[in-house]
Image (cartoon, grey):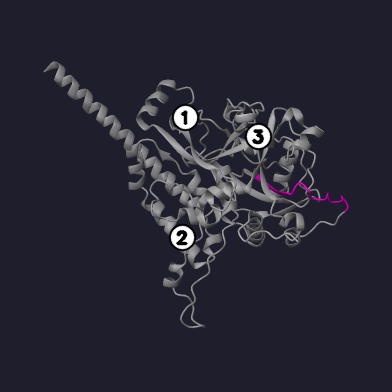
C-alpha cells in the first residue's frame, strides 16, 4: 500500500480538516444596524494519480477518517487542490450585486482598485445571504450552485466545517458592510463533476503545495516541489478618501498621502490547468485538464489576456499569473494555518503541577511564514494569532504615514498582545471575544488619526512654504 511522507501535503491536509471539524468557529452576530451576511465555499479535492482505477458510482462514500486511508489518496502522486475562480475583463465597477466575488478582494476596509500590475485577481464562489436562506451554509451552497452549477449538497461532497466569521468594513473601518462566513468542503470522489458556469469565466484548481511552499514554516514548506512567490497589490488611497467624481481632490490627496500596498501571493500556473467558459462540457477539455469546467469570478482587474499554447523554449511562457490577496488571501491563510502541527507544552517539574504563566510564555505559537508585518505591529505575533488580519492591513508608500500609524497604534498593540496572551493560555476568551474585530477597529482608528495628522502637517508645510516664497519675492 502507498504511504505518504510525514510532511506530505495530504497528511497536512488531513490534520487541517480534522482540526476544522473538531474546532467550533468564532461566530459574529450581526448588529441590528447592519444585518447583512454573506458566505463563501472553499472547495478542496484530491486529484488521484493517472493510473488510478476508476471508482464505481455506487461505491459507498468514506467518512473523513476513511478518506485519508484510501490508497489513491495516500499515493505519493496524489495532489490536493482548492478552487479559485475569475472572470475575464471584469473590474471592480462590474461586480454583480450579491456575489461574494464582489467583496472577496476587498482588503478588509472596502478597498477596490489596484495598480494595473500583472496578474489576475481570484476569489472563492459564494455571495450574500438572501431572504429565505436557512443559514450561512445554505447560502454558500446556493450561491455556488447559481454561479457554477456545482451542487455541494450531492453525495460527492462533505462539509467539513466553518472557519471563523470575519467583518467586512468600508471607509477605513468606519462602517460595517456585512459579516462573512467561510465554509470548507471536501470532494470525496476522484471523478470530475459536471458544472454549468457562465461564458467568459475560468476556474483554476491551485495545488495546496504551491501555497505551502510560500506560507508554511521552513522545515515544512521547503520540502514542497511546487513554488509560489510573494508580491503586492497597490491601491490608490485617494479612491477611498474622496468622492468618486472629485477629480481635482483625488489628485491632491494622491500627492499628499500616496498609495497603499497589500501583500499578495503570485500564483504561476500552467495554461493547461485552466479552461475557459466557452469549453464548458467539452469532453476533450475534461480529458486534457485536471480542472473542472470554468466557474464564476465577478471581481477581476481588467486587462487579463489568456495566452495561446506555446511549444519548445517558449513553453514556460504559456502560463497564468494569478494574484491572491485581500479577504481571499486572508481566508486562505486561515486555512493554511490549520495545517501547522501544534506545539506541545513543556513538562513541568512535578507531574501534578499546573503549568505556570512562565511555562505558557515559553510555548512557541505555531505560525505561518509571512514575509511582512502590519504597520505598527513589529515584534508582535499577529501572524500567529490571526494571519488573515496580517494580510489585510495596508502599508502606505510614504514613510511618515506609517510612522504616525505606529504612534497612534498603542491601543491596537495592546489588543494584539491581549489576544496573544489569550491564545497562549488556551482560555475561553479566544472564541468568546471578538479579537479580530477589535484589532481591526483599533488599527483603522490609528490609520484615520495618522492620515488626519499627515494632511494637517502637509497643509501647514504648504502654507509656510507659500509665506516664505512670498516674503522672498517681495523682499
**Residue range (magenta):** 39-58
Residue 43 within the segment the image draws in magenta: yes
Q: In the image, 165: left or right of 466?
A: right
| Mark drawn on residue 297 | 3
Q: Earlier in the sequence, mark 3 or mark 1?
A: 1
- Which mark's residue is nearer the viewer, 2 or 1? 2
Q: Name the foreground residue: 210 vs 326.
A: 210
User: Callout 1: few (<14), some (14-19), or many (20+) C-alpha neighbours within 10 Å?
Assistant: many
- Which mark's residue is nearer the viewer, 3 or 1? 3
The Cα atoms of the two marked residues, 2 and 1, are separated by 34 Å
Contact, CB < 8 Å: mark 2 with mark 3?
no
Contact, CB < 8 Å: mark 2 with mark 1?
no
User: Callout 2: few (<14), some (14-19), or many (20+) C-alpha neighbours within 10 Å?
Assistant: many
Contact, CB < 8 Å: mark 3 with mark 1?
no
Whole-percent x, y for residue 48 in the image? 74, 49
Residue 417 within the segment the image draws in magenta: no
User: Callout 3: few (<14), some (14-19), or many (20+) C-alpha neighbours within 10 Å?
Assistant: many
Residue at the spot 86% in from the left edge and 55% down from the top edge: 59
Q: Earlier in the sequence, mark 2 or mark 1?
A: 1
Number of numbered discs overlaid on the protein picture: 3
The Cα atoms of the two marked residues, 2 and 3, are separated by 35 Å
Residue at the spot 55% in from the left edge and 64% down from the top edge: 342
Q: Secondary structure at mark 1?
A: helix
Q: Quadrant of residue 8?
A: bottom right
Residue identifier under label 1: 239
Residue identifier under label 2: 420
Amino acid at each position: 500500500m502507498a504511504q505518504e511522507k510525514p510532511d506530505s501535503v495530504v497528511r497536512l491536509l488531513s490534520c487541517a480538516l480534522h482540526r476544522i471539524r473538531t474546532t467550533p468557529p468564532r461566530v459574529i452576530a450581526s448588529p441590528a444596524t447592519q444585518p447583512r451576511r454573506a458566505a463563501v465555499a472553499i472547495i478542496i479535492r484530491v486529484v488521484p494519480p493517472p493510473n488510478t482505477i476508476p471508482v464505481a458510482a455506487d461505491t459507498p462514500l468514506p467518512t473523513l477518517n476513511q478518506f485519508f486511508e484510501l490508497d489513491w489518496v495516500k499515493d505519493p502522486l496524489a495532489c490536493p487542490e482548492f478552487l479559485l475562480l475569475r472572470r475575464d475583463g471584469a473590474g471592480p465597477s462590474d461586480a454583480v450585486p450579491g456575489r461574494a466575488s464582489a467583496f472577496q478582494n476587498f482588503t478588509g476596509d472596502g478597498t477596490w482598485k489596484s495598480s494595473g500590475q500583472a496578474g489576475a485577481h481570484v476569489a472563492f464562489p459564494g455571495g450574500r445571504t438572501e431572504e429565505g436562506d436557512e443559514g450561512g451554509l445554505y447560502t454558500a451552497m446556493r450561491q455556488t450552485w447559481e454561479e457554477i452549477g456545482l451542487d455541494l449538497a450531492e453525495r460527492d461532497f462533505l462539509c467539513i466545517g466553518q472557519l471563523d466569521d470575519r467583518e467586512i468594513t468600508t471607509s477605513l473601518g468606519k462602517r460595517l458592510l456585512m459579516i462573512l462566513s467561510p465554509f470548507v468542503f471536501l470532494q470525496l470522489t476522484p471523478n470530475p463533476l459536471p458544472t454549468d458556469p457562465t461564458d467568459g469565466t475560468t476556474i483554476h484548481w491551485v495545488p495546496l503545495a504551491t501555497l505551502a511552499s510560500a506560507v508554511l514554516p521552513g522545515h515544512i514548506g521547503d520540502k514542497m516541489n511546487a513554488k509560489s512567490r510573494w508580491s503586492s497589490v497597490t491601491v490608490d488611497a485617494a479612491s477611498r478618501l474622496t468622492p468618486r467624481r472629485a477629480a481635482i481632490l483625488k489628485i491632491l490627496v494622491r500627492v499628499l498621502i500616496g498609495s497603499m500596498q497589500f501583500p499578495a501571493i503570485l500564483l504561476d500556473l500552467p495554461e493547461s490547468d485552466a479552461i475557459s467558459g466557452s469549453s464548458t462540457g467539452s469532453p476533450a477539455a475534461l480529458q486534457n485538464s485536471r480542472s473542472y469546467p470554468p466557474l464564476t469570478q465577478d471581481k477581476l482587474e481588467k486587462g487579463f489576456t489568456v495566452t495561446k499554447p506555446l511549444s519548445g523554449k517558449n513553453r514556460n511562457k504559456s502560463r497564468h499569473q494569478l494574484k491572491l490577496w485581500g479577504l481571499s488571501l486572508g481566508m486562505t491563510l486561515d486555512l493554511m494555518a490549520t495545517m501547522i502541527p501544534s506545539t506541545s507544552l513543556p513538562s513541568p517539574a512535578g507531574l501534578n503541577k499546573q503549568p505556570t504563566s512562565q511555562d505558557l510564555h515559553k510555548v512557541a505559537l505555531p505560525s505561518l511564514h509571512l514575509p511582512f508585518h502590519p504597520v505598527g505591529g513589529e515584534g508582535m505575533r499577529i501572524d500567529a494569532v490571526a494571519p488573515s488580519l496580517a494580510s489585510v492591513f495596508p502599508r502606505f508608500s510614504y514613510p511618515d504615514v506609517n510612522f504616525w500609524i505606529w504612534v497612534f497604534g498603542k491601543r491596537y498593540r495592546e489588543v494584539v498582545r491581549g489576544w496573544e496572551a489569550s491564545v497562549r493560555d488556551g482560555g475561553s476568551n479566544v472564541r468568546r471575544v471578538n479579537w479580530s474585530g477589535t484589532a481591526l477597529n483599533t488599527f483603522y482608528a490609528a490609520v484615520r488619526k495618522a492620515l488626519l495628522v499627515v494632511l494637517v502637517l502637509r497643509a501647514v508645510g504648504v502654507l509656510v512654504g507659500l509665506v516664505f516664497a512670498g516674503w522672498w519675492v517681495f523682499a
